[in-house]
Amino acid sequence: MDELLIQVDLMKEEIIQLAQDLVRIPSVNTGFMPTGNETLVCRYAEDFLAVDGIASETLERVSGRGNFIAGLSGRSGKPGLMFMSHTDVVPVEDESKWRFPPFSAQIYDGRIYGRGSNDCKGLLAAHLVAMRLLKRNGVKLRDGLLLVSGADEEHGGRYGFGWLAENHPEKIIAPYAVYEGGGETIKAAGHTA
């Protein structure tokens, strides 16, 4: 584990670049079609993981509204954990109130400023890096790890997780999931977290 953490530190510039690149993709979801362009984020994620031979796919309910799915198999052959995120961002309402342009991904005072940097492209970047490091280091997972980043989270998921659950439920099966929400007590397998 210590070795993986050292590798994260060594990848600092690459991780920053990844997060900036994701923020610079304006996948704005107004709730009205055409909107979103989440497939652009999915294609970027596909290319990022393909460098390490991690298979992925993008499923669209309609053109441009992509849902990204990637996975690492575990020894058991069973699903284990799902990393969940989303690729769409809310519209910029008043750009004059922004310190930096919303899609500039400007670094200031040790932070990346831009629409989606916190909700939810920073989390997607963390998930992508985790998968890359697990694969590069040949970590043998007990159960599978799934990464699903959905479209349309900002407007109900009818092109994202809702659509995946109705049309491709077999692709998003996992007994546990980690998502952007927090602050809740979780009880699982006799443990409280």
Image: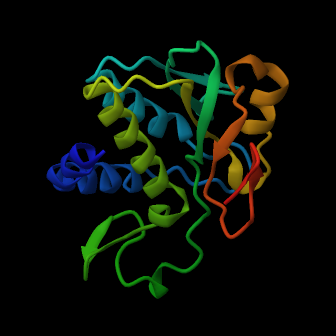
The quadrant in which residue 144 appears is top right
Looking at the image, residue 15 sits to the left or right of residue 192; the answer is left
| Residue at 30 percent of width and 36 percent of height | 133
Q: Answer above or below: position of 68 versus 93.
A: above
Nearest the viewer among 110 and 62 is: 110
Looking at the image, residue 121 sits to the left or right of residue 90; the answer is left
The quadrant in which residue 90 appears is bottom right
- Residue 10 at what x, y percent from top left? 14, 51
* Residue 16 visible at all: yes
| Residue at 72 percent of width and 26 percent of height | 173
- Residue 147 at what x, y percent from top left? 54, 34
- Residue 142 at what x, y percent from top left? 52, 24
Residue reaching furthest to the front = 190
Q: Answer above or below: position of 92 versus 53.
A: below
Quadrant where the image shows the C terminus: bottom right
Q: How many marks?
A: 0
Q: How is the image coloured?
A: rainbow
The quadrant in which residue 160 appears is top right
| Residue at 43 percent of width and 57 percent of height | 122
Quadrant where the image shows the N terminus: top left
Looking at the image, residue 76 sits to the left or right of residue 176; the answer is left
Nearest the viewer among 7 and 147 is: 7
| Residue at 51 percent of width and 24 percent of height | 71
Q: Answer above or below: position of 11 versus 44.
A: below
Nearest the viewer among 134 and 34 is: 134
* Residue 31 visible at all: no
